[in-house]
Image (tube, rainbow, N blue to C red):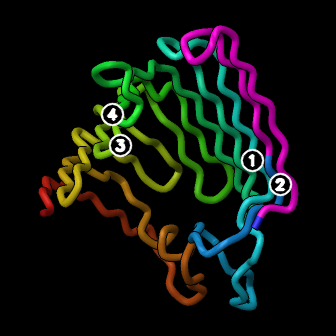
Amino acid sequence: TVAKLSGKLSLSKGLDGQIDGDISAQQLGGDFPVLNDADLSGTVQKEKIRQLHVQLKGKKAAHTLQAEVAFSSKQQLNLAADGALSAGAKNDLRHWEWKGQLQSLALTGKPDLRLVSPASLQITPDSLRLGSLQLQSEMAKLTLDQFEWLPGTLTTKGSLSDVRLLDVVNLFRPQYTVTGNLKLNAKWDLQLK
């Protein structure tokens, strides 16, 4: 559900010309999960996203995307990317490919999360590839060396370090009787088919 939706899209000289898009939505709800979905009584919130704002500027061959998401749980996600959209043979948009860089990613609130440095990103209708990236939080550090999704296959390699385990558990089920500073480190190299 969406309580309010507004937007504008300006195309000069068709899809190969200048693109200027701005979309805003308020009070989005639905069956999609978000962290801290339930209030203290255990009741699942109907409104998941308080406000969404997306801007797209540039040309098909070179553009920027910025998104701001304010969640009902008082968290905010900010994302910036730039890249290029190319069509397949004969300019067929059914075989499109987007290649670019995830320039910034930041989640404020609890938990917090931020992208340490830009990461390459490639998206097609049937694949998603993410270059090496590092995410930092007050609760942990995530290093992703490889991430590739293809239909029926997921390949990922990376590590988690300095995971403050009780802080993570408290996000899902607050613990008042257990205290400590237990930290966890993990590495993985998975190919799921």
User: Mark 1, residues whose alpha carbon is within 10 Å: few (<14), some, or many (≥20)?
Assistant: some
Query: Tag on residue 95?
Result: 4
Marks 4 and 2, how far apart in space? 32 Å
Residue, disc 1: 52
Closest to the camera, between mark 4 and mark 2, is 4
Question: In the image, what residue occupies the spot 52% across and 68% down?
Answer: 167
- Name the one closer to the observer, 43 or 82: 82
Residue 59 position, x and y percent, is 57, 12
Residue 139 seen: yes
Measure the alpha-carbon separation of dots 3 and 2.
28 Å
> Contact (CB < 8 A) between labels 4 and 3?
yes
- Few, some or many residues within 10 Å of mark 4 (<14, 14–19, 20+): few
Residue in view at x 38 percent, y 36 percent? 94
Q: Secondary structure at mark 1?
A: strand
Local crowd size for mark 2, using a 10 Å CA cut-off: few (<14), some (14–19), many (≥20): some
Q: Looking at the figure, which quarter contains the N terminus? A: bottom right
Q: Identify which residue, 158 or 45, lies in the foreground.
A: 45
Does the CB distance between marks 4 and 1 fall below 8 Å? no
Q: Nearer the viewer, mark 4 or mark 1?
A: 4
* Magenta stretch in the rendered image: 2-24
Residue 16 figure quarter: top right
Of the residues shown, which amino acid type is indicated by label 3? Pro
Q: Magenta region's main secondary structure?
A: strand
Give the image location of residue 180, x and y in percent.
46, 74
Q: Earlier in the sequence, mark 1 or mark 2?
A: 2
Alpha-carbon distance for marks 1 and 2? 6 Å
Give the residue number, with chain letter if any, for mark 2: 26
Amino acid of disc 4: His
